[in-house]
Amino acid sequence: MSPFKTSTFFERIPHAITMLFGIIVLVSMLTYIIPAGSYERVVIEGRNTVIPNSYSTIASTPIGILDMFKAIPLGFKAAVEIIFIVLAGGIMFGFMEKSKAVENAVGTLIKNLGVERKNLIIVLMTFIYGLLGVAVGYENNIAMVPIAAVLSLALGGDLILAAGISVGAMTIGFGLSPINPYTVGTGHKLAELSMFSGAWLRSILCFSALSIMAFYNVRYFKKILANPSKSLAKGLDTSNLTLSKSIQEYTISPKNWLVIGIFILGLLAILYGVFNLNWHINELSAVFLIIALLCGLASKMSATTMSETVLKSVALAAPGAFMVGFATTIKVLMEMGNIGDTISYQLSNILEGLPLYASAICMSISQSVINFFIPSGSGQALATLPVMLPLGESLGLTRQITILAFQIGDGLSNLINPTLGGLIAMLSMCRVPIDRWIRFIFPVLITILLLAFLALIVAVATNYS
């Protein structure tokens, strides 16, 4: 055997900070290479929408060293709402953890279902989190992520498995949701199609993708149980997330039920606000803080204990909050350099002249590339679909196929998108750095992408409309 250990591609993935800084430097360099350009836009119902065939080059705005570093605080400024919801979610979970309600609830759940049904619990929880992504949204579910961490560790898993159960399932569920209002809804509106039409194919694809995620979670769980050295979570901080006693000792006290009830009422209030009162991230952060305060009062914590819990929770959430702002720097640089529209324009030109089936798949791949520069689903729809829809029709693709290709490219690339604040935020709630996450989720992404491309081939073959 060779004394020199060869490292795999995944083991060579740099630290998350290093990776993001490398992308920041790369984007800054690209502003000297890629011509600046822009599409003309019109405001439709309060949103800037691209006018097709309106692209034109503009004066280059290359980014110098000072501007590159200046973009970092501007990134934090642009991401302040997501940064704070990470802190607010951390504070809320800190109070729930301090009250022992989460630990006792998870311990009691496992005791009642039976430790021997660990694999079933992982499958069920993967689909439950996936359903939350389908029906509720993305950042709206951030408060549910730490519960998966406690559950995974209680079953004998690790924090990577917790991220697979929660972040992986919610990202897939949200990204491929047949009723996603940001991608499918906006796309159908732009394409003048019936809202959420063609749901049958999207539903089959979403369920199949969640099944793959559940299978991979169980497979990884079995692997680390058989050989703990295979765990990708070695060295990650699990403080305040592990069970403190044996499963058989767990019960839920009336005080715990009160805290759980406050949490559930808070989630119901969020759902009502999101769907009926047009609530956004700031309102969610406010509800998280109210839940934290009420949990502290219900647990009869002193003012000093509550204050210490706030600071301790912020300390644990701070690295993730930092990563959100740091990642948003890339979006700021794209806007400063005016190269985002140029990338969209050039990718659309590449699609022209391709065979019909290849054009559908390449359209999805191009949306994945664009997603790294425009991580907002609705923002990307408004920026690219006015260009892609007429292009698709000229290639022989129905509008429904173009929107499906867009949804696949946007939704699945979110699994490894370092510029997506919501992904970084939820991974931080599991205390999982994105470099470790990519090592875990990349095989899942490739498998689901192949399945999604097969769905696109079926869509083209059946003239999906």
Image: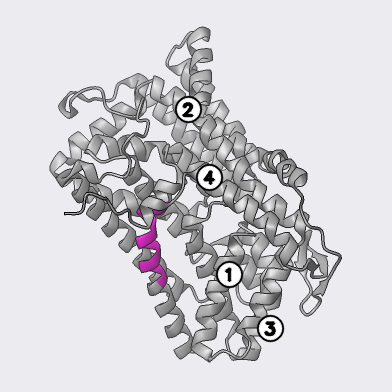
**Disc 3: which residue:** 390
Cα separation between marks 2 and 1: 35 Å
> Which is more N-terminal, label 1 or label 4?
4
**Disc 4: which residue:** 18
Residue type, mark 4 in image? Thr
Would you say residue 446 sits in the magenta stretch?
yes
- Chief secondary structure of the magenta portion: helix
Residue type, mark 3 in image? Pro
Side of 399 relative to 119 (left or right): right
Cα separation between marks 2 and 3: 48 Å
Q: Which mark is residue 146?
A: none
**Disc 2: which residue:** 316
Residue visible at 44% across and 84% down in the picture = 457
Side of 465 relative to 433 (left or right): right
Side of 55 relative to 73 (left or right): right
Of residue 283 and residue 209, the one placed in the foreground of this image is 209
Task: Kindly tell me whether residue 140 is visible in this rendering.
Answer: no
Quadrant where the C terminus is found in the figure:
bottom right
